[in-house]
Image (tube, rainbow, N blue to C red):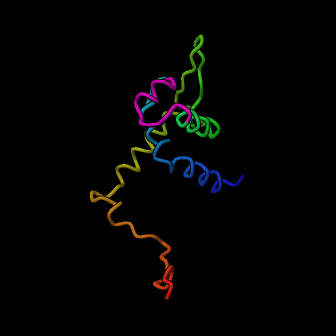
Amino acid sequence: MEEVERLQHYFQVLSDVNRLRIIKFIDKEKRSVSEIVKNSSMSQPLVSHHLKVLKNSHLVETQREGPFVFYQLTNPKILDILGLFEEMLPKENLVSDFSPMFCCPSWWGNSN
């Protein structure tokens, strides 16, 4: 796989707000699924789904301790990278300035 395609894959994985929240919550500690569920507003199956995506992308790894499985970041440098992106964010709210790339023509949906 070409390096640009690998980068695209990581950006796609990181483009989900829930996965970003999980990464930031794990931080530099080991966290169990139940801890992540308790900290987030997500259900256990949804958290498990996102952890699977993160694990398959080699962004998190697991460590078993008895009956418990803990997740930790494979490389804590991801936090530094996310921090750099946060520093680049403009001070104003981006969401309010958002305009979609595709707009329906004025006749779309009109029955005239």
56 or 104, which is in the foreground?
Answer: 104
Residue 60 percent location from the top left of the image: 56, 33
Location of residue 79 with respect to 68 vertically, above or below:
below
Residue 70 percent location from the top left of the image: 54, 22
Q: Quadrant of residue 92?
A: bottom left
Residue 98 percent location from the top left of the image: 38, 66
Pick out the residue farthest to the left.
91
Task: Give the side of residue 55 with respect to residue 80, left or right.
Answer: right
Count of numbered labels shown in the rendering: 0
- In the image, is residue 104 part of the stretch drawn in magenta? no
Give me the residue at 42% from left, 32% from top: 25
Pick out the residue farthest to the bottom.
112
- In this picture, which residue range is highlighted in magenta? 31-45
Pick out the residue farthest to the top.
66
Location of residue 29 with respect to 67 vertically, above or below:
below
Task: Give the side of residue 92 with respect to residue 5, left or right.
Answer: left
Give me the residue at 57% from left, 20% from top: 69
Give me the residue at 36% from left, 54% from top: 88
What secondary structure characterizes most of the magenta part?
A: helix
- In the image, is residue 42 part of the stretch drawn in magenta? yes
Pick out the residue farthest to the right.
1
6 or 38, which is in the foreground?
Answer: 38
Residue 66 percent location from the top left of the image: 59, 10
Task: Give the side of residue 42 with respect to residue 63, left or right.
Answer: left
37 or 101, which is in the foreground?
Answer: 37
Give me the residue at 59% from left, 29% from top: 61
